[in-house]
Amino acid sequence: MASIEELSADDTLLIAGPPMTGKYDLMLRLLVAYSQQYIVISTKNNAERVRNDLRRVAHEVSDDDIGVIDCVSHRETMESVQDTQSTKFVSSPQNMTGIGVKFTDLFGRFHDELNRGHTGVGLHSISQLLMHSDVKTVYQFLQVLVGQIRSAEWLGVAVVDTAVTDTENFQLLQHHFDGIIETRESTEGKREYRIRGLTPVTTEWRAF
Amino acid sequence: MANDEAPTVLVVEDEEELAATFERWLTPTYRVRTAHTAESALSTMDEAVDVVLLDRRLPDQPGEEVLWAIREAGYDCRVAMITAVDPDVDILDMEFDDYVVKPVPKDELIEIVDGLLALSTYDEQVQRSFGLATKIAVLESEKPTEELQNNDQYLSIRRELDRLRQEINATLADFEADSFTRAYRDLGRTDDE
């Protein structure tokens, strides 16, 4: 039976569940468990927050080993934000071309220059992309992104909030991933997950 | 000579010797057409053309005009501009897919054509996969899982999508960093279709 302790470092995974079921924390945990370098595409938290959150989980990780594509700060601060080597800013989650082009920058740096270990890519979250663009464009974007992650045999972990995402859109987009990790809160208030797609049978719910 | 199934490349270049050289390089793999002026480029252009290699400087009109006319006519082809100098910011807004600075060595020319063709193949595959994934999503939201396991139409669409996804992964495996960037740039463009 598959569990989050038995994944492969080159899996591409979609974490799906309602709000407050620990999807973002689980994404960070998986990135840290299976890789040493991280690129996070963030539509919700700014780069500084993402770095702090990752450091909290990973303990010893140097700033250089974290790349962030921040789609938040530009809108929130209304000030001009400057790209650095490892932090890139995109005006809005709507600008998926911008996200992709800057991801390709970071991809080259992590793949060809740094290469100090396995890289894990986080995308938080698909729901936000869907709020700003039609499902076809998001589908095309994920096709390229997941394909690029696969081409390097990296880990990919994306998050989708099932409460705000149309069921049909969710069904459509999940085809891009090797496996789906569903999250929920149990009746006792515990966070649980189960995995679909990696094994012939969906796993039982387990606490995490 | 390339066979009838081979992709078609239109070379638009006023230096006849250079055009002939490009043609010689490309002929083993592709069907090649050649034009030396903007006017003949447009009269040679049709739906069958997959890639246009377009010189920026032509005797009758600038290459930009040809590019504009090709896009305006709605041809679904890839265009690489061939320029004598590095392009300035002013032409970056133009809808070409790639550019190359003269002199163009053989390897680079073939790499560019191959890269643009891979991108077209990729586009077409993704469009098809989106269609299949949409059908699957509709069936999944309409019918219970148990019923779908015995639904031939559903199962055959799923198999087709699985096959297509393997083809897409094979196409992506040949992508260079530039191809990924171009695929991301295409996101806005295919939006209108």
Image (tube, grey):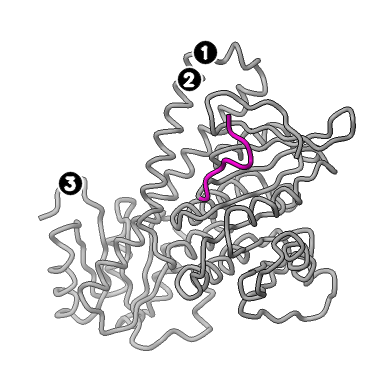
Q: Disc 3 marks which amino acid?
A: Asp
Main secondary structure type of the part rendered in magenta: loop
Q: Residues within 10 Å of mark 3 (few under 14, many from 20)?
A: few
In the displayed structure, would residue A84 be above or below residue A175? below
Taking depth in this image into account, of B19 and A71 the one nearest to the observer is: A71
Asked if disc 2 and disc 1 are in contact, CB closer than 8 Å, the reply is yes
Badge 2 and badge 1 in a common chain: yes
Separation (CA) of disc 3 from disc 1: 39 Å
State which chain disc 2 sits on: B
State which chain disc 3 sits on: B
| Disc number lying in front (3 or 1) | 1
The residue under the point 59% across, 11% down is B147
**3 or 1: tag closer to the N-terminus:** 3
In the displayed structure, would residue A193 be above or below residue B156? below
Separation (CA) of disc 2 from disc 1: 6 Å
Q: Residue furthest bottom?
A: B85
* Picture disc at residue B155: 2
**SS assignment at label 1:** loop
Percent of width and height locating residue B64: 43, 75
Q: Residue furthest left?
A: B1
The residue under the point 53% across, 83% down is B90
Taking depth in this image into account, of B148 and B2 the one nearest to the observer is: B148
Badge 3 and badge 1 in a common chain: yes
Residue holding disc 3 = B4
Q: Which residues are magenta?
A: A1-9
**2 or 3: tag closer to the N-terminus:** 3
In the displayed structure, would residue B138 be above or below residue B90? above
Q: Disc 2 marks which amino acid?
A: Leu
Residue holding disc 1 = B151
